[in-house]
Amino acid sequence: MDMTLLLSILSVATTVITIILLVVVLRRLGRHRRELAALHAAAEQRATRYRGSSEERGRAGSASTGDAQADDADDDATDDGRLHRVAVVLNPSKFARTDAFRTRITEVVDRIEGAETVFYETTIDDPGTGQAARAVEDGADLVMAAGGDGTVRMVASVLAGTDTRMGIIPAGTGNLLARNIEIPLEDPAAAMVAALTGQDHQVDVGWLRVGDSVSAARSAERQVFLVIAGFGADAEMIGYTDPGMKKRIGWIAYVFGGIRTVLGRSVDVVVQLPDETRHAHKARTVLLGNVGKLPGGFVLMPDATIDNGRLEVVVAGWRGAAGFSQVAAQVVNPRLIPRYGPKLSTMHRYLTTGVRVTTTKPQPVQLDGDTDVEATHLIATVDPGVLRLRYPEGTSPTRAPRESTPRSAEPRSAEPRSAEHRSAEPGSS
């Protein structure tokens, strides 16, 4: 083929892809602007109610001549549910002006809640766990994770299983958890307002252990994930993505990082469920989802919801660029299943309380966008409702309608009901 013609075709294809991505981004930005307006209105209403209640308490206090015990009881009833100390675990590498950030967040908390705000900065050596633990020890009512998905993950690992509330001020590239629970992405103050005016939800937390053998995985330290963990092509894509490009163009940089993963070879994978059934596949990637929405509004895992006590497992394989295009088409629109021509891709789904995945060749592992080690064995479980997470009132990250995922796209080799009451960790017996 003439080189000029080839370059022209590539240029047209790149332009079309760019236009599609821009349309998706602009639609999302419009929606976030509407969300910000609604959140600011809610904040004003809350502030007005709080000022009104404060004035009423003042008048009641000046007119009251009751005894001290009655006054104390009234104060306790008035303060019920209010926040007194808000901690912010801050990743300074995600904010260009940390001083301005601190000032703005402190103002928002003071005006809406009247609470004290304390900041704890993360470091390279301690990316958030130590800071979150100190915040709890210092008596924080609400701990905000201000940073990317990695910061959120570290804070959640400490707060899971406690009564301390957690909120998110997203400042990373993917911000997948924030996207799934509809927290404003581009305005830290609006995200803070969302936490202060939002509702408490008991959400699930996933745990992953990896190793180069079953025994090594079982003895490994478990690591938390809130969004998606997995190994194979998705971890390769994250590893290939240029950090500088992520800062310049955001999550779209992952598209360019993923180009290098398209032509890789599938490996033999065995998926074992809690009922001891095992399923063999050829796969390029295995994904374990606690939530299923991707940047751009695409839903990869319609059954992965943050409060259903289950993980959705997606095992995807493809051959070459044409096979990958079939998988990508199903992500954009689950009804786009190839009915004519060669079938160059496979996609299998499981909904389960736990899973063990074994592969014949070591694969890179990622948790919520953080690449970890290479491994041949993954053991994943879910802790239902152990994290007290605050997000905007009215948000309900519920399961997508079942008809959105055609039967032929999901051979539902899912965990049988009889396995629900067995061990959550496959192969533990």
Image (cartoon, rainbow, N blue to C red):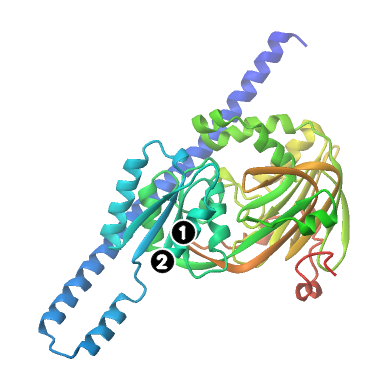
Near mark 2 (Cα within 10 A), the count class, few <14, some 14-19 or many ≥20, is some
Vertical placement of residue 259 versus 79, above or below:
above
Q: Quadrant of residue 7?
A: top right
Q: Residue furthest left?
A: 63
Tell me whether circle 2 and circle 1 mark residues in contact (CB < 8 Å).
Answer: no
- The label shown at residue 134 is 1
Spatial CA distance of label 2 from label 1 is 9 Å
- The percent position of residue 247, horizontal first and vertical second, equals 50, 32
- The percent position of residue 151, horizontal first and vertical second, equals 53, 49
Residue located 78% across and 71% down the image: 423
Vertical placement of residue 380 versus 244, above or below:
below
Amino acid of disc 1: Arg
Residue located 52% across and 54% down the image: 130
Quadrant containing the C terminus in the rendered view? bottom right
Residue located 31% across and 81% down the image: 77
Quadrant containing the N terminus in the rendered view? top right
**296 or 284: nearer the viewer:** 284
Disc 2: which residue: 139
**Residue at disc 2, secondary structure:** loop
Residue located 79% across and 54% down the image: 408
Q: Quadrant of residue 17?
A: top right
Tell me: 116 left or right of 297: left
- The percent position of residue 202, horizontal first and vertical second, equals 54, 68
